[in-house]
Amino acid sequence: MADDDRRWDAGQSQVDREGFRPSAKQIGAGAIVVALIVFVLQNTDSTPVTLLVFDVTFPLWLMLAATIVLSLGVGYVLGSRGKTRKKKD
C-alpha cells in the first residue's frame, strides 16, 4: 500500500504543492516592465528623429521600445561578459 502512495507523489515537486511564490527581485522586475509598457503606450505621437544625416519621423512609442530593447541587449552582453571574466580569476 505504501508503494502506491509514493508512486502518486513522485510526480509532484515541492513547488507544485506550495504554489509559485515570486521573489522580491521578480516582483520588482515585473513592476518595472509594467511601468515601461504603460509609459510606451501613453506616448503614441510621432516625433522627428535624426539618424546621422537623415531626418525621419517615427512614432514615439516605437523609438522608446527600440531604446528599451537596445538597452536590455547591451546590459545583457555587458553583464554576461563580467560573469565569464570572474570565473577565470
Image (cartoon, rainbow, N blue to C red):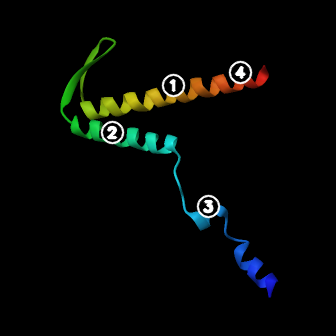
Q: Would you identify the image quadrant in which residue 52 lies?
A: top left
In percent of width and height, residue 29 lies at 45, 40
Q: Residue at x 72, y 22 (%)?
A: 86
Which of disc 2 and disc 4 is earlier in sequence? 2
Cα–Cα gap, marks 3 and 1: 33 Å
Give the residue drawn at x 73%, y 72%: 10
Lower position in the chain sequence, tag 2 or tag 1: 2
- Please, what is the three-letter code of the amino acid marked with disc 4? Arg
In the rendered image, the vertical position of residue 30 relative to residue 4, given as above or below:
above
Q: Amino acid at mark 3?
A: Val
- Nearest to the eye among marks 3 and 1: give it: 3
Instruction: Check disc 1 and report the residue beneath it.
Output: 74
Check disc 3 and report the residue beneath it. 15
Real-space Cα separation, disc 4 to disc 2, in angstroms: 33 Å
In the displayed structure, 71 sits above or below 54; it is below
Task: Residue under label 2, please give it.
Answer: 35
Q: Position of residue 89 (x, y in %)?
A: 78, 19
